[in-house]
Amino acid sequence: MDANKFNAMPRPELTHPYVQLRQAASVIMLREAANTLEVYVQHRATTMDFAAGAVVFPGGRTDPEDAEYDFGEAVRPILSNHAKGWQKTSLGSTNSQEAVTNASMMLRTGLREVEEETGLGLEPQILRPWANLITPVGLPKRFDTFFYIATPDDDLVPENITTEATSAEWLTIESILRDADAKRIALMSPTRFLLSGILEYGSIEGLLQHDPVVEPIRGL
């Protein structure tokens, strides 16, 4: 992820300088079709008070219960790998157990949000830490958002079961970016940034070969 490109994007005026960050998770579900990458996106309802009408990935903020969820010992190696990926973010800790606990909380958030919004019960092993974007100072709502990429099997069919979105669908990344450029859809800067970065890999295989230590990207 290129922080310089993200930070070069236009920023709004600082109308709300003292808003506290909320932790959140978002899951970028990907698949290959006709030699191109497709992503599952939601079309947010225009009545929402955040990202109204925008094209987004499934996700939402962390609930207190997410920190209490126990995945069990079988998932601990996955959580240890996630803790390494998030080590430079606010989930990181010099205490290895705390880092794993934080990784568990965020993984639970991502999996829960996907199930609540699409009906899919994804397996923990298909989620990989991908990015950490922090909302610029000055906006009325601010999030410390942890993005995962996930590659669900073809037999897993997501449905739009959330009232927060009017519809949801698989779209090619190229078509999303093209429609955003033509102003046919609303696309927030972080979403555009993430999609553009993913597109550069060209394939699921290329994405899965990239196992990063995530660098937090701040809006300012």
Image (cartoon, helix red, strand yellow):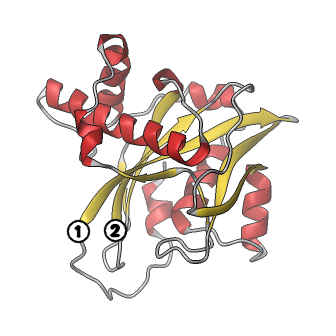
Give, as a three-letter code, the residue at label 2: Arg
Q: Residues within 10 Å of mark 1 (few under 14, many from 20)?
A: few
Residue 86, how many percent across, how many down? 32, 37
Q: Alpha-carbon distance for marks 1 and 2?
A: 7 Å
Give, as a three-letter code, the residue at label 1: Gln
Please tell me which residue lies in front, 86 or 24. Answer: 24
60 up-or-down from 74: above or below: below
From the viewer's perspective, tell me whether residue 194 is left or right of residue 107.
right
Q: Residue furthest top?
A: 74
- Label 1, secondary structure: give it: loop
86 up-or-down from 51: above or below: above
Quarter assignment of residue 54? bottom right
Please tell me which residue lies in front, 98 or 211. Answer: 98
Which dot marks residue 20? Answer: 1
- Would you name the residue on which mark 2 appears? 142
**Residue at (72, 69) in percent of width and height:** 180
Q: Are marks 1 and 2 in contact (CB under 8 Å)?
A: yes
Q: Quadrant of the C terminus?
A: bottom left
80 up-or-down from 46: above or below: above
Residue 85, how many percent across, how many down? 36, 32
**Residue at (77, 74) in percent of width and height:** 184
